[in-house]
Every structure is written in structure tokens, then in C-alpha cells.
């Protein structure tokens, strides 16, 4: 750890952290943790995002068990949380390393000592490549694996790494896409061309193949299975062509959070290659799970015997206006609430007397920058001004990003830790 | 200033600030400013949001001139930028104070010494009210004015302020809404009831009326004018009823960024009241302006002789993949780009040779978390892998929030300062 997590525990609570108690200003995070404040009576202000300590524990265990059972190496996508404390817990549970999307995210991971990074993008920025080369050359244990999907990309990387005087080679995997999908080569001929280009450089080293099934056009079980078959076939073809000779291991990687059952199945059928294979799964959303898209999309719905995930987020907002019988305004909006994959649901209402009831008859109709419009059905026990309303949201990636410091709350309401994010 | 802006200039450049040069790690912001780096060759990495120094200057001047010409006090909505440096520049240009939406934003403003805050929400959170009371009682110059729109809200505020032992009264304005709009009383009878409730407390003091025309259902010139007329009439009625007796000034406030011409007109017709009137305009988006919603909605389109605003944001992303003739993938997505009021437009392409051309034939078709999908029209000079692509975006509020440190760039590409935001 070049910058230990201790530094986060030493941060001072101040105006930077929305939702945290104004009365705690000046305390260090570790001191506030030690106070074990109650979420509801401890001086926290709304809007306030919370994570369930138990749900996070459950999800970390559940996903790692799934991966281990299927011989998969987990490289959770760190872009979801951008939380070094959660990166560390994923590593402690047995993850191979952390996946990221852009060099900035790699820098955050490295700042907290993540030893292995999978950068799921072609990295052609000279300044970022110079940084990566320096990180690699300063730390012989550090590994970073990037995508390549074009000969031009390979040429740019090679040029930048040579200009930076890189000593160690940068490990790359050929990214396989599909017609109409996101990045990645469209066929095996292009893949071979890119691999040839890599082999011709002195700065890059081909270590495998990878891709993302989640961006296939109209991805469904059949198209995902078919594409995963192609990815495995590409690994076999490259291996037969001797492209992986001398490697300690070959990386074959896929998998977001919607098809990891299919990834496990396809990778389970991958024949033996000439070298040991690292079957890498990159799911990220599982840590927090959600109350929307991923609740519906998780493969555990199809294979419940394989595990389960629990929604860990709860956003508390306060009713600040009840201007009409059918309308309540909350003091949380686009700044606080994810809205790109559906609006939140109302899960509970906590009165100023501390009593909690369900959210029946209440629905979030729309969001302004700083307000949520909640419709109150005729006859519903509408919330009153001052009540706290609990929202369940969709899409972990756009939830985490809105909150720099997130209380981790036990089932009894005790805040047991604070999760720091860097976006 | 309880926390001078100097503290921001002393911050260390590190992994927290996406886009900033990895090679600048360890420098203080003031040191990096002094280096006057070139945006394109200074080691910055993509994605990277920039602000035009000239456009920001122009917009600050233009809006303040408009306000002064019409006798309006500007209390720019700080939620837009959450940037203490920009707050200070707004104050230096003559703003009355800064508007905020939630107590967390008030804390940021206060941490940087903003002397007057308009909190455009009913504030009923006891912990936040205790904080506000302490701020007020510690600093006799500090003023904070909040909304009230219900007798219950007034009762909760009074209870919390009494429990907190508040000495100074909290200034409040009755918020006027409209049927089908956001918060605020729906008619004058409710307004009077709320004002009576305020008068019956010892902790609150009524200082005016306010509202937000931008949330009227299907707001148009006619409905906005009509509502502004009601707001002025409410001020007159309250004044006649003696509700403002003894005040140093009466606040009448409205105005986002889409109807400030109508606000100026309506407030210009406000008859003399028994006390001096602070005609307060709360526009926020003008500082950066945009290339979408506000480009279309700015009142300066209707009254160009009154002033103009320039779009100040430009987001640079890099082409990381050209997998098909009609498709380019950029390394910026929902994490970096505002998408709630329309997708960005491609404004320019900068080749790896430094040559800049227009964005003709290129369009952002959709965004993933970390990627933009750019369609390339047949025959268009498509961007190549490694090129930087400049995007113009819609909605300042959701642009600023995604970037903690934003280079301020002069027309010649020199970075002259860095704007820190706190979300």
C-alpha cells in the first residue's frame, strides 16, 4: 500500500461530505466510527445515502463463492464503487485484482496499492502511458493489463511507451467485440492482425483475449452464449498459433453483472490451453446490488441455488413540502439519486416520532436537480413535512458517484464505518 | 473568510482530480497555475472538462450588468457550480449573496465565508437548523434566508430552533407556488396562514416572498408573467397588512436562468412598498452557460440588446476505438458528461498532429457509464484512434457536478487557473 487506507480513516469530517453530521465537523473519520452513532438520531442530515453493512458483507461473500466454485478469477469492476476500502475488501475476499475503465481510475487504485489492474479499454493517451510505465518500472510486483483492438492503437501505445523509456512491457489482451456492439475487433482476422502488431512491438506483450458481453446488440441468453463461444474459440486459435508461448498464464476475460452465469458456463467448457488459464470475471455492480436494473438482471434470478445478492443502498430524503394532497417534495434530486436506469422506488417512511411504515401509495414521478416529486395516491397515508423517506434506486454506478462518504449501517441503525469514494 | 480560497490553491494535485496531469502529482494547485501549462501538450489526460476563462469572465459581467440595469440584486444559485472560487467572483461582481438548495450546500458556502445565503427550500431538519443557528449566533454579519410554505414546516423550524437555543431569529420568506407546480403555497389564503404562523413564533422573522417560475406547469411567457404578477401582488398584500413593519428591507425573489427578462419586467413594475425592496434574481446557470438547454432558453435570445452569454464548457475525450466505419468510441461517458437534458454535440476534433477540425458528420448517439458512442456519417472525415474530440453539453448543473477540479483555459490554450467544486 503506497497510500494506506489509514489515510482515509484520518480524514477530517467537514463541509465536503454531504449528509454527515454538521456537529461532527472536525472529527476524524476514525473518531466518528468509534462513536458508533445512530443513523436516525446521530445528527446526520438529509439527503443521505447509506449502505447496509450486512448486505455488503453478504454480496462480497456470495460473489466470491460463485467465482471460486466455477474456477473464475474475480477482477471486480472498480468503476462502480471507486472506493478503495471496497477494493481492499474485494481483494481480501480473494479477487485477482481490480478492473477499471480509464487511467484516472487506475491512478486511484494504484494510490491505494492495488497490485493488479485490468484496464478494460485501449489506452492510447501518451501521458497516461508514461504514468503507467513509471508505475510498472517502479514496482516489479504491479501488473496492469490493457485492451487493444486496432493496429493504430497498438502503434500509438508503442510510440508512447518508447518515448517514455518504458522498461517493462505492458501486458495487453485483444478485445473481441461483435458487429453493432461497442469496441473490440469484429472478427478473428482483425484479431490476428492486432495480435501480429503487438508481437511486432518491443513494448507490448499479448497475454490473452477479453470482451464484454453486456454491449452486444439486444443481448440475450442466446447471443451472449454464442459470443462467449467465439471468445473462447479465439483463445484456442491464438494458443494454437503459438501466440501465448512462454506466458505464465493466459487471460480469458468477460463478464459484467447480468450474464456471469453464462460466463461461468462458457469458461467452464474452455479446453485446456498450452499454459494455465486465468478465467477472469469482471462483475462490479454486485457489491451494492440495487433495487432496479440489477435486481431484475442478476443471473442469481436464473440460478438461485448458486447464490444471491442483497440491495445495500438506501437513500434517505426529507419531505420539505406537501403543497397539494397528491404531491410531496423531497430534498433529494438528480444530484443525489441515480436516474439513468429508472426512477427510484419509495420503500419506507420514517415519521418525526421515529415510527417507520411502508411506502405504499407513494411513487417518485420525476426529479429536479435538488428535488424529488413524490405522488401520493388518494387514500394513501401520505408523508408529512419533516418525515424521512427511504428510496431504493437502480444502477450502482450512478449511485456511488454522487456520494463522497457513505455511512455503512448495521441492521440496528448503528453506523459502523464510512466508505470513501473518488470520482 | 473563515476558510480562505488560499486553502484551495494549496491543495495537492493527486489521484483525486481526474484529467489533471499524472506528472503534476505532488504539486500544489498554485504551483501548477504558475506553470501555465498548455492544455494540449501539458500532460493532461482525457476525459477532461475545461472552462473557457474568457467565457466565464464575459458571463459574470454580462449577468451582473443585466441585474444592475434593472435594479435587481443577484443571488446566483450556487447549486449549479458548488465552486467557492466562482461564488467569490460572483460576490466580487456585486452579487447580494449566494443561493443554495440544501443545508449541505449552505455549509460549503459558509466554509468559504459567503456572508449572505438564500436557502431556496423549507429547512426542517433539526440538525441542520442547529448548525444554522450556531452559524448565525457566531457571526452577527451572516444572513441566511429560508423558504417557508406550511404551518407544519414553521412549527418544526420553531421547535428545532428553540431546542437549539437559537438567539438570533431565522429570516424566512413565504414561498409562493402554483397549482401543479413544485413547492410553495397555492394561494394567498395559505400564504397568510403561513405568515401568521411565522409571526406567532419567536424564532422566525418574515422578510419577504419568493418562488420559482421555472417549475410552473408548461411554463411559457404568459404563465410566467401571470405568476410573477401574483408574487408581486402577494408582496403588496403582505406589506399592506403590516407584515413587513420594521424591516430594513423586504425581499421579493424569483428567477432561474430561463425567464430573467420577465422577472426584471415584473419586478420593475412592483409599486413602492413601505420599506426598501430587495428585488432578488437567483439565476445560476449563466456562469458557464451551455451548448444545449440554456443556449436555447436564455432570455438574451429574446432581448439580445440586453446582453449575451457564451458557452464556457468544453469536454475533451479521446477516441479509443474505431471498430466499424460508422462508429467511434470515446473514453467519456455518463461519469463525465451531462445527459439529463439532451446528449452532447461534437464540436471539434483535434488530431494527434495537433490539427483541429470541425465535428461535421459526427454525433453522440448514446452514452455508457464510461464510453460515448459517436456515429460517423458516410463520407465524414471520421476521427481516428488517439484523436481528442471536443463535446459541447447541455445543463451546467449536471456538468459541474462530475468534475472536482476544472482547468480554466485561455483562448490560446494556456491553463490559467483550476476551479474546485464540492458536490
Image (tube, coloured by chain):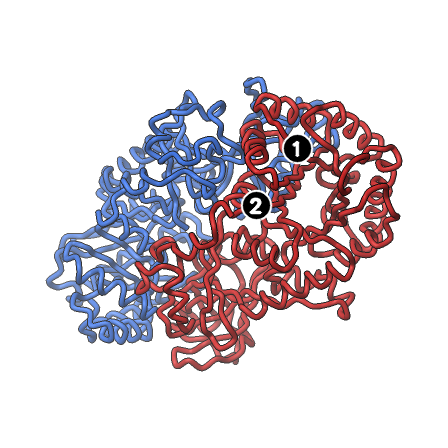
Chain colours: A red, B blue
Mark 2 lies on residue: B334
| Residue lying at 29% horizontally and 68% vertically, measured from the top left | B191
Q: Nearer the viewer, mark 1 or mark 2?
A: 1
| Residue lying at 41% horizontally and 52% vertically, measured from the top left | B214
Residue contact at pointers 1 and 2, CB within 8 angstroms: no
For residue A170, the mark is: 1
Left/right of residue B238 with respect to residue A182 in the rendered view: left
Can marks 1 and 2 be said to lie on one chain? no
For residue A137, the mark is: none
Q: Is residue B337 visible to the viewer in this orientation of the structure? A: no
* A80 over B132 or under it: above or below: above
* A421 over A157 or under it: above or below: below
Locate residue B370, reporting x and y percent.
60, 43
Dot 1: element: strand
Residue in front for this viewpoint, A275 or A225: A275
| Residue lying at 58% horizontally and 48% vertically, measured from the top left | A79
Residue A161, quarter of picture: top right
Q: CA distance from mark 1 to mark 2?
A: 28 Å
Locate residue B371, reporting x and y percent.
62, 41
Callout 1 crowding tier (Cα within 10 Å): few <14, some 14–19, many ≥20: many
Locate residue A353, reporting x and y percent.
39, 81
Residue B230, quarter of picture: bottom left
Q: Is residue B23 visible to the viewer in this orientation of the structure? A: yes
* B401 over A121 or under it: above or below: below
| Residue lying at 54% horizontally and 36% vertically, measured from the top left | B47
Residue in front for this viewpoint, A356 or A52: A52
The chain that hosts pointer 1 is A
The chain that hosts pointer 2 is B
Locate residue B231, reporting x and y percent.
30, 58
Amino acid at each position: 500500500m503506497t497510500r494506506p487506507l489509514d489515510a482515509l480513516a484520518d480524514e477530517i469530517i467537514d463541509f465536503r461530505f454531504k449528509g454527515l453530521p454538521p456537529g461532527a465537523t472536525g472529527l476524524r473519520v476514525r473518531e466518528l466510527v468509534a462513536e458508533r452513532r445512530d443513523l436516525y438520531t446521530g445528527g446526520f442530515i438529509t439527503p443521505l445515502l447509506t449502505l447496509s453493512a450486512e448486505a455488503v458483507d453478504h454480496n462480497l461473500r456470495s460473489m466470491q463463492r460463485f467465482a471460486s466454485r466455477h474456477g473464475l478469477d474475480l477482477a471486480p469492476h472498480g468503476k462502480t464503487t471507486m472506493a478503495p476500502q471496497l477494493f481492499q475488501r474485494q481483494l481480501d475476499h480473494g479477487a485477482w485484482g481490480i478492473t477499471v475503465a480509464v487511467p484516472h481510475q487506475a491512478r486511484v487504485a494504484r494510490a491505494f496499492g492495488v497490485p493488479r489492474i485490468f484496464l478494460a479499454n485501449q489506452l492510447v493517451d501518451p501521458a497516461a502511458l508514461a504514468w503507467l510505465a513509471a508505475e510498472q518500472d517502479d514496482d516489479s510486483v504491479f501488473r496492469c493489463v490493457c485492451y487493444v483492438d486496432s493496429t493504430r492503437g497498438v502503434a500509438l501505445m508503442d510510440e508512447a511507451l518508447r518515448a517514455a523509456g518504458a522498461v517493462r512491457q505492458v501486458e495487453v489482451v485483444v478485445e473481441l467485440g461483435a458487429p453493432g456492439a461497442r469496441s473490440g475487433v469484429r472478427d478473428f482476422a482483425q484479431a490476428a492482425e492486432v495480435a501480429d502488431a503487438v508481437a511486432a512491438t518491443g513494448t507490448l506483450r499479448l497475454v490473452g483475449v477479453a470482451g464484454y458481453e453486456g454491449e452486444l446488440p439486444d443481448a440475450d441468453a442466446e447471443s451472449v452464449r454464442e459470443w462467449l463461444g467465439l471468445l473462447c474459440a479465439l483463445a484456442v486459435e491464438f494458443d494454437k498459433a503459438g501466440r501465448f508461448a512462454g506466458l505464465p498464464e493466459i487471460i480469458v476475460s468477460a463478464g459484467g453483472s447480468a450474464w456471469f452465469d453464462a460466463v461461468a458456463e462458457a469458461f467452464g467448457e474452455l479446453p485446456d490451453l498450452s499454459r494455465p488459464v486465468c478465467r477472469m470475471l469482471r462483475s462490479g455492480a454486485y457489491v451494492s446490488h440495487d433495487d432496479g436494473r440489477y435486481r431484475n438482471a442478476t443471473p442469481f434470478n436464473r440460478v438461485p441455488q448458486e447464490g444471491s445478492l442483497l440491495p445495500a443502498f438506501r437513500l434517505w430524503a426529507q419531505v420539505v413540502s406537501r403543497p397539494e394532497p397528491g404531491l410531496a417534495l423531497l430534498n433529494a434530486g438528480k444530484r443525489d439519486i441515480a436516474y439513468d436506469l429508472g426512477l427510484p422506488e419509495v420503500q419506507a417512511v420514517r415519521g418525526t416520532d421515529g415510527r417507520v411504515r411502508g411506502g405504499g401509495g407513494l411513487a417518485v414521478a420525476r426529479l429536479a436537480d435538488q428535488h424529488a416529486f413524490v405522488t401520493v395516491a388518494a387514500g394513501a397515508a401520505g408523508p408529512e413535512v419533516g418525515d424521512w423517506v427511504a428510496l431504493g434506486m437502480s444502477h450502482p454506478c450512478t449511485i456511488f458517484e454522487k456520494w463522497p462518504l457513505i455511512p455503512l449501517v448495521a441492521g440496528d441503525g448503528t453506523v459502523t464505518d464510512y466508505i470513501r469514494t473518488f470520482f
